[in-house]
Amino acid sequence: MAELMITTLSRARSGAARRLPAVALSVALAALSAYGWQSGGRGPGAAPAVATERFSGLLLPSGEAIPNLSLVQQQIQAAYRSGQWSRAITYVSQEAIRAVDERAPGATKPAIVFDIDDTALSSYQVESRMNFGFVEAVWDKWAESEAAPANDGVLQLYRHALERGVAVFFVTGRHERLRAATEAQLRKGGYERWTGLQFKPDNYQEPSVVPYKSGARRRITEQGHRIIVNIGDQWSDLDGGYADATFKLPNPMYYIP
Ligand SMILES: [Mg+2]
């Protein structure tokens, strides 16, 4: 691919490497490691080698190495299982609760906008099943037949907003055809009432969801609401204005432009 810089180095013969003076060897190793190569030794006592056949030099134009997909999948699983991810969501949600407390009293018809997937509800289980890819048939079947657990921190924010008299709106990238399934998942997850629930039109063709999501927020403000908080797991949930404060949750599983 044109935008990728591919760096290859021929394998150094270990015999030749051993004859190099120590200084020259360390300079060479530093230069190689700058290009993403590692020495062949995997621990104390391992045979020294300047470079192995291990190819790790697929770089972005920025010089940053492209991560290994399988290792990233393992990291995502570890972050989920350790509770680190959930704690990060709770931390951001607590910040949003503070914003509700600060902004709701002075606002006319205050409103809060929630994204659904990996904001209000976790789709980790089905994502994990798809190896963090996306298979629409698998996703739809999951939405129509299974529960999706709430993200606890976000559920707390939802309840807090309702208690403060803030109108709740969900603006989701799910298609309109999943309305009944989504309402059922929200209720099972603990989100029992809302003022509005907006789905992406089934025929939506834009490359980004920003026009759809910001348009939905604009219509909420046109109904006289002031959106004091908008929370989502994608930047595209938040870009495009029509919210006084925005809160971004972590989501290492996928990216939605
Ligand atoms: Mg989402």
Image: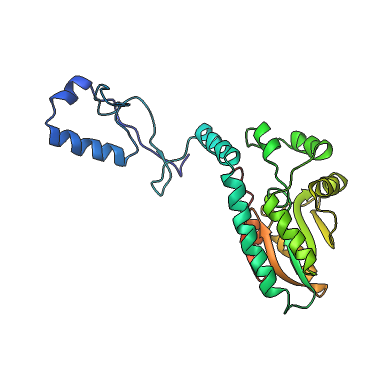
Report the residue that reaches farthest toward the top.
Answer: 15
Task: Determine whether, in the image, residue 78 is placed left or right of residue 170.
Answer: left
Q: Position of residue 224 (x, y in %)?
A: 81, 75
Q: How is the image coloured?
A: rainbow
Q: How many marks?
A: 0
Q: Residue at x 69, y 71 (%)?
A: 101
Task: Determine whether, in the image, residue 200 is placed left or right of residue 231.
Answer: right
Q: Residue at x 53, y 32 (%)?
A: 70
Q: Position of residue 138 (x, y in %)?
A: 75, 33
Q: Position of residue 42 (x, y in %)?
A: 33, 26
Name the image quarter holding residue 46: top left
Task: Determine whether, in the image, residue 8 is placed left or right of residue 233.
Answer: left
Name the image quarter holding residue 4: top left
Report the residue that reaches farthest toward the right.
Answer: 180
Q: Residue at x 80, y 35 (%)?
A: 141
Q: Position of residue 220 (x, y in %)?
A: 79, 68
Q: Is residue 88 above or below residue 167?
A: above
Between 167 and 176, the residue placed more toward the observer is 167
Name the image quarter holding residue 185: top right
Q: Is residue 240 visible?
A: no
Q: Is residue 98 above or below residue 250?
A: below
Q: Is residue 22 visible?
A: yes
Between 217 and 227, the residue placed more toward the observer is 227
Task: Determine whether, in the image, residue 189 is placed left or right of residue 243.
Answer: right
Q: Residue at x 59, y 43 (%)?
A: 83
